[in-house]
Amino acid sequence: MIIFIGIALYFLLMEALHLSNFFYLRLFNIIFIYYGVNRSLKTNFVEGKTNLADNAISALFTSLTGVFLSISGLVAYIYAKGGDEYIKTLSESLLFVGSPSVMTYNISLLFEGIVSAVIVTFSLLLFWKKKYPSD
């Protein structure tokens, strides 16, 4: 939920400040994924859960849940703002020919989110594994 709330507030702030058309600002979404996954792993290690496989499942579940909730929220928001007409006002940074539909746009963002979630998860797993090596 922290990931979802962070990304949603960040997106709404960008929208309010008329910065949503700057594609490079989407890179900061990774901060919220990083924070949520790091918090999840930190909690696991403080509780003595050092099994790498269990922590990987927990961290991936955390990050992917945040990404799926964020994309679902974005779909709802886009439809509330006008659907395909609203998509035309968003960033043109994704590689599309013509104008994308709501679902095409969000599926592309979903893939982008999944990739960033997996990268963040595995990099944090390596960090915590080094910090708290198992027996």
Image: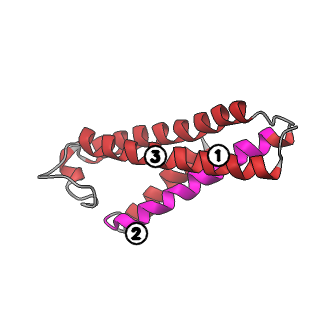
- Disc 3 residue crowd, few under 14, some 14–19, many 20+, Cα 10 Å: few
Give the extent of the magenta segment.
Answer: 21-44
Q: Position of residue 65 (x, y in %)?
A: 54, 36
Q: Quadrant of residue 1?
A: top right
**Colouring chosen for the image of the structure:** secondary structure
Q: Position of residue 23 (x, y in %)?
A: 35, 64
Residue that label 2 marks = 17
**Rendered residue at 85%/42% (across/down):** 46
Q: Is residue 62 left or right of residue 15?
A: right
23 in the magenta segment = yes
- Disc 1 residue crowd, few under 14, some 14–19, many 20+, Cα 10 Å: many
**Rendered residue at 27%/46% (across/down):** 105
First in sequence: mark 2 vs mark 1: 2
User: What quarter of the picture does the C terminus occupy?
Assistant: top right
Question: Number of numbered discs present?
Answer: 3
Q: Is residue 135 left or right of residue 89?
A: right
108 in the magenta segment = no
Most prominent secondary structure in the magenta stretch? Answer: helix
Residue at the limit of the structure toward the front, as seen here: 135
Q: Amino acid at mark 1?
A: Val
Residue that label 1 marks = 37
On the question of residue 80 being in view, the answer is no
13 up-or-down from 126: above or below: below
**Rendered residue at 32%/45% (across/down):** 108
Residue that label 3 marks = 115
Task: Identify the element where label 1 is drawn.
Answer: helix
- Disc 2 residue crowd, few under 14, some 14–19, many 20+, Cα 10 Å: few
Task: Identify the element where label 3 is drawn.
Answer: helix
Foreground residue, 19 or 91? 91
Q: Amino acid at mark 2?
A: Leu
Foreground residue, 63 or 55? 55
Q: Amino acid at mark 3?
A: Val
